Image (spheres, rainbow, N blue to C red):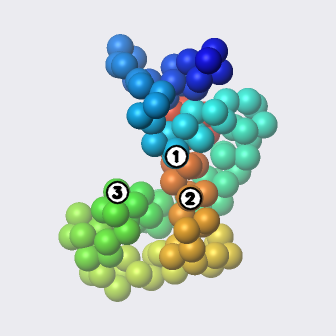
C-alpha cells in the first residue's frame, strides 16, 4: 500500500487527487521510474529522438493527435508528407517502426516520465 501511495504521489499534479485504482498503465509505469538509473535510461532515450527540434515537435504532436497524421499536419500547419518524412526519420533513429506497439509504448512512457520530471 505504501508503494502504491508513493507511485500515486509521484503522478499527482500539485494539489490534485490521484486515485491509484484509476491510473492508466502508462502513468503508473512512468511514476514508478524514479531512481537515478531510471532517469538516465529515459534521458538517453529521449536525447536520441529529440536531436532534431522539428522531428521532436512532430512526434509529440503526432502522439497528442492519437497517431493521426492528418490532424498532426493541421496542428503543425505543414503538409502531411512532411509529417510522414519526419516520422520516418525518427523510425530510422530508433530502428523500429512507430506502428510497433512496443516502440510507441517506449516513447509514450518516456514522454510521461519527462512530464512527471523523471526524465529530464
Above or below, 4 against 65 in this view is: above
Considering the numbered disc 1 on the image, is that residue within a helix, a strand or a loop?
helix
Q: Nearer the viewer, mark 2 or mark 3?
A: 2
| Quarter of the C terminus within the rendering | top right
Residue that mark 2 sits on? 105
Viewer-side residue, 42 vs 108: 108
- Residue 42 image offset from top left, x and y in percent: 66, 46
Quarter of the picture holding the N terminus = top right
Could you tell me residue 76's position as x and y percent?
27, 65
Say few, some or many: other residues with alpha carbon within 10 Å of mark 2 (under 14 / 14 to 19 / 20 or more): few
Side (left or right) of 118 relative to 63? right
Q: Which residue is mark 3?
A: 64
Q: Secondary structure at mark 3?
A: helix
Foreground pick, 93 / 110: 110
Distance between the Cα atoms at labels 1 and 3? 14 Å
Is the residue under label 2 in contact with that under label 1 (CB below 8 Å)? yes
Would you name the residue on which mark 1 appears? 26
* N-terminal label among 1 and 2: 1
Whichever of callouts 1 and 3 sits on the residue coming sooner in the sequence is 1
The reply to whether dot 1 and dot 3 touch (C-beta < 8 Å) is no
Residue 47 drawn at (x, y percent)? 63, 54
Select label 1 or label 3 by which is in front.
1
- 60 above or below 92? above
Q: Residue reaching furthest bottom?
A: 81
Q: Residue at x 42, y 25 (%)?
A: 19
Q: Position of residue 112 (x, y in %)?
A: 50, 43
Q: Is residue 22 left or right of residue 47?
A: left
Q: Is residue 36 above or below residue 103?
A: above
Q: Residue at x 59, y 41 (%)?
A: 29
Amino acid at each position: 500500500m505504501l508503494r502504491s501511495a508513493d507511485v500515486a504521489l509521484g503522478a499527482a499534479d500539485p494539489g490534485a487527487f490521484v486515485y491509484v485504482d484509476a491510473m492508466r498503465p502508462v502513468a503508473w509505469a512512468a511514476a514508478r521510474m524514479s531512481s537515478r538509473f531510471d532517469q538516465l535510461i529515459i534521458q538517453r532515450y529521449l536525447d536520441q529522438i529529440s536531436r532534431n527540434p522539428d522531428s521532436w515537435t512532430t512526434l509529440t504532436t503526432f502522439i497528442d493527435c492519437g497517431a493521426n497524421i492528418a490532424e498532426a499536419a493541421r496542428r503543425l500547419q505543414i503538409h502531411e508528407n512532411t509529417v510522414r518524412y519526419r516520422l520516418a526519420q525518427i523510425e530510422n533513429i530508433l530502428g523500429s517502426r512507430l506502428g510497433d506497439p512496443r516502440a510507441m509504448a517506449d516513447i509514450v512512457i518516456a514522454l510521461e516520465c519527462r512530464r512527471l520530471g523523471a526524465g529530464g
